[in-house]
Image (tube, rainbow, N blue to C red):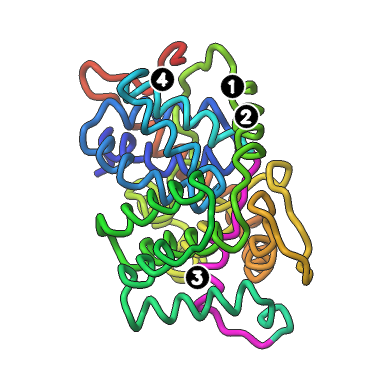
C-alpha cells in the first residue's frame, strides 16, 4: 500500500530532477522536505558532492566555499543557497557521462579520444588498485595547481574516503581527474555562480511533487507500472530503463553548453560526452513517447489518493 512516506521519499529524486531541469520551485520544495527529515537530511549531506560532480562538476569549489560559511549563515541557509545556484547554473554533465562510457563497449573513432581513453584507464586502475589509492595519487601528484583547484580536489578526496558504493566513488574519482585535466578557473566559476544566484527569485512557492519527480525504482512508480506490464509485452527492467533515461535523466538542452568532439582541450563548462552518451539511448525516447501518457496517468492517479500525515502538507507557501 502506498503511503505518505512513499510520497515524501520522492524528495530525493525530485531534487535531482529539478536540478537537471533548472526547476527552482521543485528544487526548493524538495530541499524543504529533505531538511525537515533527519534521515533525508543526512542522505543529502552525504550525496550532494556526487550530485554536484554529475550535474556541474566545476562548482565543487563553490560548494567548498559554502561549507566554510555554514557557521556564519547557518546550515539550512547555506545549503539552500547553494542548491539555488546548482539548479540555475549551466550544467556540465561529462563526469556522469564518462562514468557510463567507461564500462560501455566501443568501436567507433570517438573512443580514441584522449579524455575517454584516459578515463577508461583510470577506471580500470581503480578496479585493480582501489579507489582510495588512485585518488590519493591524483591529489599528491597534481603538480602546480592553484589553491582553489587543490581545495576542490581535497573535497572530493574526502568524500571518496568517507565510503559509499564503488560506482559512486569511481564517479567522484573521475571528477577529480576531469578537474585536473580541464582545470578550474576560479574567476569564471565565480561569475557563473553569481549569474545563477541572481536568477533565483526572491520568493519561491512550494509545490507538490509532480508525477515525473518519482524515479522508476520508487514504490509509487513500481505500483504504477503494474497495469502497464500486464497490458504490454515489455519487461520491468526494460520499462525502468526507458523511463530512467528518457524522463528521470532528461536535462534541458538550453542549460547545457554542448560542444562537439574535437582534438582541442575542453574546458570545465563544456559537455562533450553527455550528448554522445545520450545518443546511445535515443531509441528509448521513441518508445517513451508511447508509454509516457500512460505512466503519467497511473502515477497521478496514485498521487491523488495519498493523504498527508497529521501535521504535514503536500504543499506550502513561500519557502525562500
Residues rendered magenta in the picture: 90-107
> Sequence-wise, which precedes: disc 4 or disc 1?
1
For disc 1, the marked residue is 200
Q: Position of residue 214 (x, y in %)?
A: 43, 44
- Number of the front mark, 3 or 4: 4
Which element carries disc 4, helix, strand or loop? loop
> Sequence-wise, which precedes: disc 2 or disc 4?
2
Residue 23 in view here: yes
Give the Cα separation between the discs numbered 1 and 3.
42 Å
Q: Position of residue 198 (x, y in %)?
A: 63, 21
Query: Does 293 sit left or right of 263 as displayed?
Result: left
For disc 4, the marked residue is 315
| Image-quadrant location for residue 45 | top left
For disc 3, the marked residue is 234
For disc 2, the marked residue is 196
Question: Which residue is drawn at the image coordinates 40% and 67% (left, top)?
Answer: 170
**169 in magenta:** no
Indicate the quadrant containing the N terminus: top left, top right, bottom left or bottom right.
top left
- Number of the front mark, 1 or 3: 1
Q: Does 313 appear above or below 244?
A: above
Decide which of 318, 66 is in the foreground and name it.
Answer: 66
Which element carries disc 1, helix, strand or loop? loop
Query: Does 172 sit left or right of 108 as displayed?
Result: left
> Sequence-wise, which precedes: disc 1 or disc 3?
1
Q: Does 154 appear above or below 280?
A: above
Outermost residue to the front: 144
Residue 297 in view here: no
**97 in magenta:** yes
Amino acid at each position: 500500500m502506498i503511503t505518505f512516506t512513499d510520497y515524501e521519499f520522492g524528495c530525493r529524486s525530485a531534487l535531482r530532477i529539478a536540478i537537471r531541469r533548472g526547476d527552482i520551485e521543485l528544487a526548493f520544495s524538495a530541499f524543504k522536505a529533505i531538511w525537515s527529515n533527519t534521515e533525508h537530511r543526512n542522505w543529502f549531506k552525504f550525496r550532494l558532492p556526487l550530485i554536484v560532480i554529475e550535474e556541474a562538476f566545476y562548482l565543487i569549489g563553490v560548494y567548498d566555499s559554502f561549507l566554510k560559511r555554514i557557521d556564519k549563515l547557518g546550515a539550512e541557509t547555506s545549503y539552500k543557497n547553494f542548491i539555488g545556484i546548482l539548479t540555475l547554473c549551466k550544467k556540465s554533465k561529462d563526469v556522469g557521462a564518462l562514468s557510463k562510457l567507461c564500462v560501455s563497449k566501443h568501436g567507433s573513432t570517438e573512443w580514441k579520444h584522449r579524455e575517454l581513453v584516459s578515463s577508461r584507464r583510470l577506471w580500470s586502475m581503480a578496479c585493480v588498485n582501489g579507489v582510495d589509492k588512485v585518488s590519493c595519487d591524483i591529489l599528491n601528484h597534481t603538480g602546480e595547481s592553484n589553491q582553489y583547484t587543490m581545495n576542490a580536489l581535497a573535497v572530493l578526496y574526502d568524500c571518496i574516503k568517507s565510503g559509499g558504493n564503488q560506482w559512486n566513488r569511481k564517479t567522484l574519482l573521475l571528477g577529480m581527474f576531469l578537474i585536473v585535466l580541464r582545470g578550474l578557473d576560479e574567476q569564471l566559476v565565480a561569475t557563473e555562480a553569481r549569474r545563477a544566484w541572481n536568477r533565483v527569485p526572491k520568493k519561491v512557492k512550494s509545490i507538490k511533487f509532480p508525477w515525473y519527480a518519482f524515479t522508476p525504482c520508487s514504490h509509487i512508480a513500481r505500483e504504477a507500472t503494474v497495469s502497464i506490464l500486464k497490458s504490454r509485452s515489455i519487461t520491468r527492467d526494460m520499462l525502468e530503463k526507458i523511463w530512467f533515461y528518457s524522463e528521470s535523466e532528461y536535462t534541458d538542452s538550453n542549460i547545457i553548453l554542448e560542444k562537439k568532439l574535437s582534438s582541442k582541450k575542453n574546458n570545465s563548462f563544456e559537455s562533450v560526452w553527455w550528448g554522445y552518451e545520450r545518443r546511445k539511448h535515443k531509441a528509448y525516447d521513441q518508445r517513451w513517447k508511447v508509454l509516457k501518457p500512460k505512466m503519467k496517468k497511473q502515477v497521478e492517479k496514485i498521487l491523488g489518493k495519498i493523504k498527508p500525515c497529521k501535521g504535514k502538507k503536500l504543499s506550502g507557501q513561500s519557502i525562500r
